[in-house]
Image: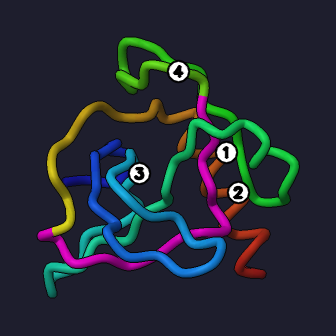
Amino acid sequence: MKKGDICLINLNIGEGHEQFGERPAIVISETETDIVIVIPITSNLNALRFPYTIAIIPDKENNLYQESAALIFHIRAIDKSRVLKKIGEINKEFQKKIDKILREMLKL
């Protein structure tokens, strides 16, 4: 896995407003300790009303089947065993937009 990969992940447990279930996510980083940092993706476009989200248009590169929203404010670390398979990847321009939002959100 590498930064920018879109993978299907299993978030079988969630509380309140946390994302859960099988869903695509954008890989931000894979650590040496088998932890993967991801940004969950939702097909619920109402999520775009929140700050720190960005729309994703389906294309041949990302292999998403419908317009979706990357929930950057839901960034989380998961065990590598929760990654089911790679389904696509985002392009470099989109990655730059995510990096900018992450820096803003984390006050970097």
Assign a secondary structure to mark 4. Answer: loop
Number of the front mark, 2 or 3:
3
Give, as a single range, the part of the protein colored magenta.
68-81
- Please tell me whether residue 3 is drawn above or below residue 11 in the rendered image: above
Q: Is residue 85 above or below residue 75?
A: above
Q: Position of residue 6 (x, y in %)?
A: 34, 42
Give residue 51's quadrant in the image.
Answer: bottom right
51 lies left or right of 93: right
Give the residue drawn at x 58%, y 33%.
93
Q: Earlier in the sequence, mark 4 or mark 2?
A: 4
Q: Which residue is mark 3?
A: 25
Mark 4 nearby-residue class (10 Å; few <14, some 14–19, many ≥20) = few
Residue type at numbered disc 2: Lys
- Asked whether disc 2 touches disc 1, contact meaning CB atoms under 8 Å apart, the reply is yes
Tell me the distance, in whole angstroms, between the alpha carbons under discs 3 and 1: 16 Å
- Whether residue 4 appears in magenta in the rendering, the answer is no
Residue on which the image places disc 2: 100
Residue 67 in the image, given as x and y percentages of width and height: 60, 24
Q: CA distance from mark 1 to mark 4?
A: 20 Å
Q: Quadrant of the N terminus?
A: bottom left
Q: Marks 3 and 1: CB-CB under 8 Å?
A: no
Q: Which residue is mark 4?
A: 66
Q: At 63% from the left edge and 56% from the top edge, which residue is drawn? A: 71
Q: Earlier in the sequence, mark 3 or mark 1?
A: 3
- Residue marked by disc 1: 97
Q: Secondary structure at mark 3?
A: strand
Check if mark 2's residue and mark 3's residue have beta carbons within 8 Å.
no
